[in-house]
Amino acid sequence: MANYELQRISDVPQCLHMPYIQSGYRPTPCSVKYCIRSMFLWTNETLNFWTHFVPFLLMARKTWIVLDNNQWEPINYPLFIYLFGACFVLLLSSMAHLFNACSTWCYHCWFSSDFGAVLMYGVTFQSAIEHYVCPVRCFGIVQDQTREVYLQMSMYYCTVQIISACLGYLPNFSKLFRCFMYFFGMVIICTPCFVRYYLYGTQNETSQCWKIGQELANMFYLHCVLICVGLIFYASKFPERVFQGTFDIVGSSHQFFHIFVAFAMFVDAAIFETALQQTKNLIEDGVISEDYFEISWKTTFGHTITSVCITYFIVAVFNFVINYDKKYKLE
Ligand SMILES: [Zn+2]
């Protein structure tokens, strides 16, 4: 068994190389026990783990409180499913960073599963946005049929994204493509909100839509800024690209990416909690009936569970295939 001294980039398998990170690598292969112990060692994955594990604990606590304070009824489903999605992606990301050093195959399994969780998060985010904040039928031209197609679109887009993501973990495929695919997915989901705020404003009520309020619009813009700043760190690899060797353990771009994304998730949770409260007030005041929101098990849990099945089926096939390829076989 390898010794557990931290290694330089040249000592670990190529697929585990992090761009511009020169040192602080855990030896690969290594044991599960060592990976768990490495939570408290200063490696180049320690802060990548904690910057998503602490937000996971906070999000799990928030979810617990929300479940405790709200009935299990359709009007609450989009908020519930969003919180489950956020907990899932934060937990999977932190586990991927903790256990990826076990073997090269583990690395592929964990990070393809991690990206699958990111896609699930996108589906749950879309469900909450569509039901509480910016329904596509606000724009008048959208019939029920079109709405159904729009809601299913992110499910199918998951398939394209997860295939490109799995390929992105192999050598010779650009990781930037994965970043672009994620950004494009977010654009599809957020477009109804941009259209609603820019064309209709926040104070107007139309025959299809209720008043949204400036507070929610501001929170939505904050979400967009946080996600964009996070993605800029992810794609630019700054500061380690410029100061090579200086930020291997603390201060690398991936840590900033995690922090901005985690903040964005808490902003999103606040958006959906506020929007749900507004929705309940509108129903209580008799402005809109609950039926108008058309929240069902199918458009919330149903879509998410279908996406989970499609995504993780592709992830499983991908990892099964690469396990039979000599280049990626367990070492
Ligand atoms: Zn990460």
Image: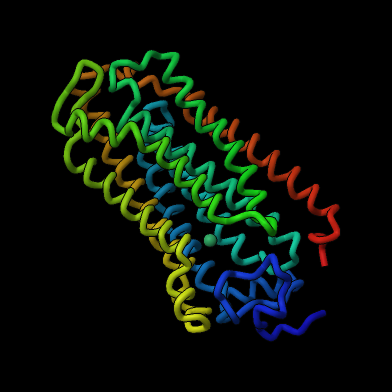
Return the residue found at the far front: 172
Question: Which residue is painted at 79% across and 48% down in the image?
Answer: 320
Whether 189 is drawn above or below 298: the answer is below
Quadrant into which the C terminus falls = bottom right
Q: Quadrant of residue 76?
A: top left
* Residue 183 locus on image (x, y percent): 45, 46
Give the color scheme: rainbow, by chain, secondary structure or one colour. Answer: rainbow
Q: How many marks?
A: 0
* Residue 40 locus on image (x, y percent): 56, 78
Question: Which residue is painted at 22% across and 35% down in the image?
Answer: 197
- Can residue 21 be seen from the camera position used here? yes
Whether 207 is drawn above or below 248: the answer is above
* Residue 272 locus on image (x, y percent): 33, 40
Q: Quadrant of residue 126?
A: top left
Return the residue found at the far left: 203
Question: Which residue is painted at 43% across and 39% down in the image?
Answer: 125
Question: Which residue is painted at 35% across and 35% down in the image?
Answer: 191
The residue lying toward the viewer, choosing from 288 and 12, is: 12
Is 261 positioned to the left or the right of 114 in the image?
left
Is 281 positioned to the left or the right of 224 in the image?
left
Quadrant into which the N terminus falls = bottom right
Whether 298 is drawn above or below 269: the answer is above
* Residue 317 locus on image (x, y percent): 75, 43
The residue lying toward the viewer, choosing from 115 and 31, is: 115
- Can residue 54 be seen from the camera position used here? no
